[in-house]
Amino acid sequence: MLQPLALFLEATAIFAVLTGSIASIISIYPGLNREAAFFILGAAACGIVVSLVSRRKRPARPDHRILQLMEGVADELKKNLQTINGLSEMISHWSAREGAEWRDTCHHLVETTRKLALFTSQLHDYARLERGALHLLEQQVDAAELVVAGLAACEDKAEHADVFIKADLSGSAELRCDATRIGQAITSLVHWIVETSPSGSSIGISLIRRADKGLEIRISNPAGRAPVAGAATLFEPPVPITGLNSLALPIARRVALLHCGNIKVEAAPGTGTSASLCLPARRVDWPELADTNPPRAG
């Protein structure tokens, strides 16, 4: 409430100052056409007020110095976490001959280190994406193989949640994309669908040829229970951070946009939850249908 009131008062003050200036000019130059002067200077006053309002409404651009600081912090964390992760693996290996309690503690240490390393990598990628400093490494890759690789990173999570994944990867195509980044985006979307799926339900993954000859990688669960109201904010970083995987979906959408594609999410009561990664036609090569009745020779 205070911000709109402050904006209104500031705009009113500017308008009052300018209209006061108009009256002063007319009193100094009595021969001036009053109607024309009021019209011209009044229009200028309104223009300044409108400009002020629109400037206040415009979202602030990210501070590149802060983004560079985030990137630097992430770099330093990554260097030290590699050492910590190596030591954790060694301790876990040595603990194999110890008691169950010690093994569980070492396993927890290894998993925590891996999660922290993943978050640090995501923080680094997010800062680079916001600064426009992340560049794609384009490769030729089969879409079905890319989805299979992305699903491999989701098996443990799906098994733990008792969610079955079924992939229909017929009608695949060749993609020109950053295979690593797109694979990570697929994994992030599958993770989100798993998290919003009830135990015992099934997730379907399919490759869809769009009308514009682009590709849609669709992940859906008719029994999904994603909150409808929260779907619009999924792709912005949460403030405060709500977990070590909080930047996965914001990064996924930004990577899709770098490919001139997008990610769309649908969540509605009774129809379940779906997420789609869409890539434009210029990044997709669809196999042409072979002629099943070639002409006979002679």
Image (cartoon, rainbow, N blue to C red):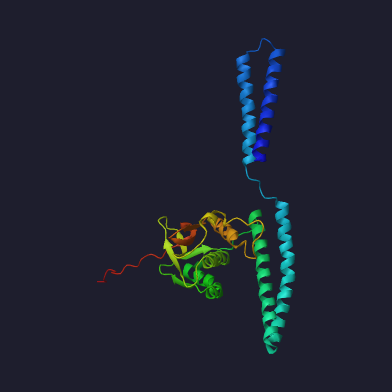
Residue at point 47% right, 61% down?
274
Determine which quarter of the picture holds residue 119.
bottom right
- The residue most toward the front is 1
Locate residue 155 relative to residue 173 in the image: left or right: right
Q: Position of residue 17 (x, y in %)?
A: 70, 25
Q: Position of residue 178 (x, y in %)?
A: 56, 64
Q: Position of residue 177 (x, y in %)?
A: 53, 62
Q: Is residue 143 above or below residue 48?
A: below
- The residue most toward the left is 298
* Viewer-proximal residue among 279 and 188: 188
Residue at point 66% right, 29% down?
12
The quadrant of the rendering that contains the N terminus is: top right
* Viewer-proximal residue among 288 and 18: 18
Locate residue 188 relative to residue 6 in the image: left or right: left
- The residue most toward the top is 31
The quadrant of the rendering that contains the C terminus is: bottom left
Residue at point 62% right, 65% down?
245
Q: Position of residue 168 (x, y in %)?
A: 42, 70
Count of labels in the image: 0
Q: Is residue 185 above or below residue 38?
A: below
Q: Is residue 197 above or below residue 10?
A: below
- The residue most toward the bottom is 97
Determine which quarter of the picture holds residue 108.
bottom right
Q: Is residue 84 above or below residue 287?
A: below
